[in-house]
Image (spheres, rainbow, N blue to C red):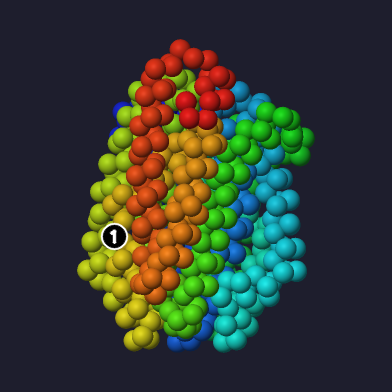
Amino acid sequence: MKNDLFEKYPIPKAVMTLAIPTMLSMLVTIVYNMADTYFVGQTGDANQVAAVTLTMPIFFLLMAFGNIFGIGGGSYISRLLGEHRIADIKHTSSFAFYGSIALGLIGMVVFLVFMDPILTIAGASPNTIGFARDYLTIVAYGAIAISLQNSLAQIVRSVGAAKESMIGMMIGTIVNIILDPIMILSMGMGVAGAAWATVIGNACAVLYFIYYIFKHSDVLSIAPQDFRMEGAIAKNTFAIGIPASVNNILMSFSMIMLNSFASAYGDTVIAALGVSGRVFSIVVMLALGLAMGIQPFIGYNYAQQNYKRMNDAIKFTGVVGMIMGTVVMIVAILFAAPIVTFFINDPEVITIGATMLIIQMLVSPFLGLQFIVTTVYQSLGKAIPSLILTICRQGLAFVPILIVGSTLFGLQGIIWAQPLADVVSIILAISMYTVTYRKLRASKTEPISMAMEDGLA
């Protein structure tokens, strides 16, 4: 355990100690996604790039399964750590491990049985559905590995082992990057090779996490005898995990809607959307990594009722997120066309993709604030506020803006939909947390159990 980090380190040192490895882990996730797009793009076939784009929402759904137990169990574990309840931590981590396996199996069956309807809804055309089917079939068979990798990385991180979480994800990414050119290009497998590289990389990461928990963790467990499905464990895991997974589910849903609306403008637009989306994911994943990095710190200090230290860390993290987002935005805007060209040398894709990238990047400086506040609510065990913010970004704000924008402004309305939805969500997040912190300060003597029952306390 690393109690000094949570209790005694200066705020900047504590935040960066936790956040830097987590952000690097998120960069690893970006490389996962970009490697597939890059090497498939080297085939020169825009239809294969579009196919990878169309199947990405399915990948996010599998991550959602892992998030139910990874974020939900991790949030509860961090609070248990603050209360020094080691036996309950072991039970919770074991519950998360086997729960992730079960949901991975369910995901595999659903995607294999309903593959063609899913791809049709996602916007696959006669030119892309064959490639998309090849990719999704292999990813479906690897559903357990993908779900487990996402879950275990967050469970390990929840006890302050951010470096070890990063190492596991790095192992998976390195394997993926090595296998991508071999399978996609040298073996001529195309998108199927990209899928195999992704699944094998995730499986290697899972093996590392299992090894770490068995050999090096004194608080985590995945042993069958530690498995418990007691009320408190399931309740606290699902109370945060389900809203967190809704984020990925809605992200998948919004991507499917976006691809479906964009498909009316041709497969080239889908390919451009995929490339610009991968680059924009740099900002999203860095912001998520920064936010997720402070999750153990927030959960621990909330359990200790040290609200000032908790809030100081949140404010410092927000400033770091704004600086980071601004830097990435400037670089992306200045080099938009060369960045898209790096993935695929198709003049039409480059022109459309560069425009999409510039528009998406405009919200980058403030995007981190939304993810930080959402993660804070998850850390506090407050399901309702985190669910509200999640639904707003990918649903309540995004869907109406997309529908109205596409009707009134065509392709431009589609491109602007997510940035405008982010603006609405950022304003809502800041407003909600301001109210929440004032209530926490006013009720510092309130028992923790009572505070956790108050969704917005």
**Residue hosting label 1:** 362
Name the quadrant containing residue 443.
top left
Q: Is residue 173 visible?
A: no
Q: Classify residue 313 as left or right of residue 84.
A: left
Comparing 415 with 409, the one in front is 409
- Mark 1 Cα-neighbour bin, 10 Å: few <14, some 14–19, many ≥20: some
Query: Residue at point 32% right, 81% down?
Result: 351
Q: Which residue lies furthest to the top in this view?
A: 445
Q: Is residue 172 above or below residue 231?
A: below
Name the spot of residue 396 as percent of width and height, x first. 48, 52
- Which x, y percent locates residue 242? 61, 44
Q: Position of residue 105 (x, y in %)?
A: 73, 57
Question: x, y percentage for residue 215?
Answer: 62, 40
Quarter where residue 131 is shown: bottom right
Identity of the amino acid at label 1?
A: Leu
Task: Please identify the residue farthest to the right as the structure is shown.
Answer: 225
Height in image: 125 above or below 138?
A: below
Q: Is mark 1 on a helix, strand or loop?
A: loop
Task: Say which of 373 and 86 sits in front.
Answer: 373
Residue at image location 55% in from the left, 19% down from the top: 450
**70 or 329, which is in the foreground?**
329
Residue at coordinates 38% horizontally, 53% vertically from top-left?
Answer: 422
Q: Is residue 344 toward the left or the right of residue 200 in the image?
A: left
Residue depicted at 70% across the width and 45% down the height = 99
Q: In this view, does 386 lie to the left or right of 329?
A: right
> How many marks can you see?
1
Visible residue check, residue 85: yes
Q: Nearer the viewer, residue 201 or 41?
A: 41
